[in-house]
Every structure is written in structure tokens, then in C-alpha cells.
Amino acid sequence: LRNRQNNGGHFSIVADYNEAENQVLILEVSGGRPSFWVDAREMWDAMNKVDRVSGRVRGWIVVERP
């Protein structure tokens, strides 16, 4: 995401959605980094890019109750 200093991929939690602002709350799991709100379109664009290491498009893991 723009203006974020990330040196590698990891999984973080999308914890909330603000429909009025079209933003999602990301709970950062990487130590020392704060959680943050980001525009949903910017988040989508970031997740829809090819990862340099795997050569595959980044993606989502959806966790739901059975």
C-alpha cells in the first residue's frame, strides 16, 4: 500500500469496513507496525498484483464458520 514500509508479505486481518468512507481497517500482525484504515480500492489494487517471489497474484483467505 502506498507509503507503507513493508519488506515482505504476511497475512493481516481485515477487521472492519466503513461503507461511508469505503475504507477497511487492517489489524497489523507484524510486530511494531500500527493497525490502519485504508481505502478499499487501494487495498484491492495492492492485493491484485503479482508477487515477485512466487510469481503468483496475491490473494485473500476467507475464514468462516462451517
Image (cartoon, rainbow, N blue to C red):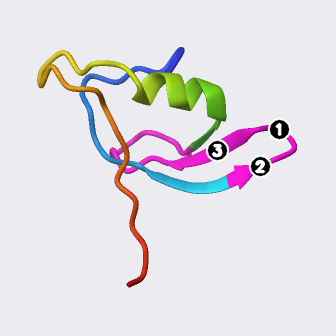
Q: Which mark is residue 24?
A: 3
Q: Quadrant of the C terminus?
A: bottom left
41 or 9, which is in the foreground? 41
Residue 16's x, y, as percent? Answer: 65, 56
Which residue is depicted at the point 20% across and 25% down? 56
* Residues packed near mark 3 inside 10 Å, few (<14), some (14 to 19) or many (20 plus): many
Q: Are marks 2 and 1 in contact (CB under 8 Å)?
A: yes
- The residue to which callout 2 is attached is 18
Q: Amino acid at mark 1?
A: Glu
Question: How far is the residue under mark 1 from the one under mark 3?
Answer: 9 Å
Are the two marked residues, 2 and 3, in contact with CB atoms closer than 8 angstroms?
yes
Residue that mark 1 sits on: 21
Which portion, as a residue range, is magenta? 17-35
Magenta highlight: main SS: loop
Image quadrant of residue 48? top left
Residue at left 54%, top 31%? 43
Q: Residue furthest front?
A: 66
> What amino acid is at disc 2?
Asn
Q: Nearer the viewer, residue 3 or 64?
A: 64
How many residues crowd mark 2 within 10 Å: few (<14), some (14–19), many (20+)? Answer: few
Q: Residue at x 36, y 19 (%)?
A: 49
Instruction: Looking at the image, tell me whether mark 2 or mark 3 is earlier in sequence order.
Output: 2
Report if residue 43 lies within the magenta region: no
Distance from Cα at disc 2 to Cα at disc 3: 6 Å
